[in-house]
Amino acid sequence: MAVSDVAAPMPFDWRLAAKRILRSPATTIIMILAGILCGLYIPAFAHAISPVAQIYLNFLKMVVLPYLVSSVIFSIAAMVQDPKSVRYLGKVGIAVLVVSFLAVLVSGTYSLILKPGQIENPQSRIELGEFINSQGSVSTDLAFPFQPPSTGDPNSGHSIFMDLVPNNVFNALASGQTIQVLLFCLLFGLAMGKIPQPSSLSLSQALNAVYRACTVLTNWFVWGLPFATFILIADQTASTGTKPLMLMGGYLLVMGLSCLTFLAGAFSIIAVRSRRSYWATIKTCQPLLMVAITTRSSVASLPWVINLLSERLRFNLVVVELLVPLQAALLRTGPALVYTSGALFIAQLYGHPLAIPDLLLVGIVSALLALTTGGMGSLLILSQMSIVCGYLKLPFEAAFALFVAVDAAVDTFMTLSSVCTVAASTAMIAPSHREATQSEEPIANEFEAEPAR
């Protein structure tokens, strides 16, 4: 046998090895723990390196709107020209009802079982009161007034709908008004779908090119995710310390368990639909989880959801590009968890017993209120909890300082729950590449079996 016939060893691919290390769940855990230790013991260094992470977050967010505009307009135009696409919209409505019910049920059940607001230790209650008093005017500055929602203004409902419609789409793009941009993309895509294909072909190709370029950018940015996670966790720990986390440990436990429940369910759905093992599904979704933890933004995670489902899990690209932004605006799992568990936490904290009608009211108001939170920041989402508390006549203002202190952790749970729910719901509705191929085979066989005339 000649020497040349012996297979030469494969050269070491350092890029593939580095990508596997950076995307490993162990790397994520190590970076989070290292960030906590850095924030506790070297707070000055944690604050000094925080601008690096903010620059990285700006890089991630700059891709979101071009990605959103190109994918939504292109996918809706393609679906309008396909008469079979109408059936997906009804499934989205069913998904909204199911997810809202499950979010209220899960968080409410954990809150009633664990009772995070019932603090029996007198010393803990004293420390809790001291912490609230030490926050000064933060609760009154940021929270809504403590009163039941007013129904006297007949135009209050009109203003909500007026805020959804952009009077200048370029201003909405510049200011990052995601819901207004999404509405414009939906209408523009519908109109574009009515144009004959030869006339709209050039624009479709341009939008597809923008989408592909944004996909390449997001793949580049994945290299810096573990380091940005370390910096952000370190900065947050150095700013708040561990005392608020200890005082709100019970509430954070409820939110964490609720988030894990939805993550486990989402991974199960994605594993079944993609025909992968459960562990392989977790490893595949790991970059998306890192983006959600790092950015704490459902909107910034949308390109990664689309890339995960269409490129890595091989679901229908056109359907995925339509459903992901649409469901991100409608499937508000995280806010529903916060409103339900937060209202029950405050009721338990002040010893306010809730009967079954009160619990039903909390669930209904929380589910409906969560639908209005698209595009809101975490503090504004938290402050809207006063509406739920107002119906139950609960003192929200004083407790608001506690929620502000643990906002980073709560916002992370909200983002993870919402993003994974969107990914699982899209995987449940969108056809996979295998299903699309199988559905085309009977049609091809039918044409082949038809005798020639």
Image: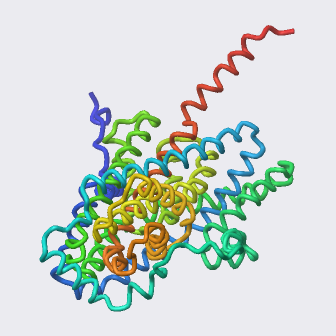
Tell me how many marks there are. 0
In the rendered image, the quadrant that contains the N terminus is top left
User: In this view of the protein, which residue sits in the foreground, 271 or 406?
Assistant: 406
Picture layout, residue 2 above or below residue 245: above
Residue at x 31%, y 83% (from the top left corner): 49
Picture layout, residue 441 above or below residue 385: above
Q: What colouring does the structure picture have?
A: rainbow
Residue 311: x and y in percent read 51, 47
User: In this view of the protein, which residue sits in the foreground, 155 or 204?
Assistant: 155
Task: Please state if 312 lies on the left or on the right of 5 as rendered.
Answer: right
Residue at x 41%, y 45% (from the top left corner): 266
Residue 250: x and y in percent read 24, 64
Residue 43: x and y in percent read 22, 84
Residue 401: x and y in percent read 34, 80
Q: Is residue 288 visible?
A: no
User: In this view of the protein, which residue sits in the foreground, 400 or 167?
Assistant: 400
Residue at x 52%, y 59% (from the top left corner): 302
Residue lying at the far bottom of the rendered structure: 136
* Quarter assignment of residue 270: top left
In the rendered image, the quadrant that contains the C terminus is top right
* Quarter assignment of residue 225: bottom left
Q: Is residue 442 visible?
A: yes
Task: Please state if 408 lies on the left or on the right of 39 as rendered.
Answer: right
Picture layout, residue 407 above or below residue 93: below
Residue at x 36%, y 73% (from the top left corner): 407
